[in-house]
Image (tube, grey):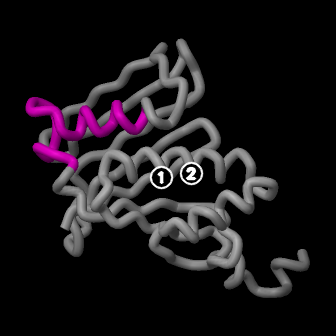
Amino acid sequence: MKLLVSNVGSTSLKFKLFEMPEEHVYCEAKVERVGSTDSAIFSYKNLETGYKESADGLCIPSYTEGIQLFLSKMTDSKIGVIPSVDEIKAVGFKTVLSKGYYGVHELTDEVMAGMQECLFVAPVHNAAYIEAIGQFKKILPDTRMVGVFETAFHTTVPQERRIY
C-alpha cells in the first residue's frame, strides 16, 4: 500500500512516499519559503533511480502550488515513481491541534472543524494544515487522510519535565 506522509510547516512542505508495510521509501521532496512569489526553493529525489532535482527562485504563493508541484514530479513519466496519484491509499499528516482530538484520527469534517476552532492557539500551523489537507482532499477525494496530533506527544512527557 502506498502511503504519502506530509509535514506542513509555517512556510514549508515536506513529503515522503512509502510502500507499507515494507517501509520502503520511493521519493521525497521539500518546498521552502511557501508564500513567496520569487524565492521559494524546491527539491525532489527519486530514491528508486537516484534522480535529484532542485530549483530556487520559484513562485509558490500557497501550499496548493507546492503540493501540485510535488505531485506532478512524483507522477512524471520520466522522473516520477508512480503513474497516477490514484495509487496513494492514504495521506498522513503531523498535525498540531484539534479541539477534543488527541492522538491519531481520520481527518473527518468534525476533526477539521476542531482544527478550525483552535486557530487562535496555533494560527500559523493550523491554517497551513487546513489549507494543505483541503487541497489533498480535492485531489484525492476517495483517499483516507489521517492526522497524528502533536498534543498526544505532550501527554507522555513526565510531570517533572512539564513543570521544568
Secondary structure of residue under mark 2: helix
Residue at figure coordinates x 35%, y 34% from the top left: 68
Amino acid of disc 1: Ile
Tag 2 residue:
129
What segment carries the magenta color? 66-85
Give the vertical position of 105 relative to 89 (above or below). below
Please say whether residue 79 is one of the residues in the magenta stretch: yes
Amino acid of disc 2: Tyr
The x and y percentages for residue 146 are 44, 68
Dot 1 surroundings within 10 Å: few (below 14), some, or many (20 or more)?
many
Give the distance between the C-alpha atoms of the residues marked 1 and 2, in whole angstroms. 6 Å
Quarter the C terminus occupies: bottom right
Residue 126 or residue 155, whichever sits in front: 126
Relative to residue 89, is residue 156 drawn left or right? right
- The answer to whether the residue labelled 1 contacts the one labelled 2, judged by CB atoms less than 8 Å apart, is yes
Residue at figure coordinates x 30%, y 52% from the top left: 140
Dot 2 surroundings within 10 Å: few (below 14), some, or many (20 or more)?
many
Residue 133's disc is: 1
Residue 50 occupies which quadrant of the picture?
top left
Quarter the N terminus occupies: bottom left
Residue 160 or residue 93, whichever sits in front: 93
The x and y percentages for residue 102 are 62, 78
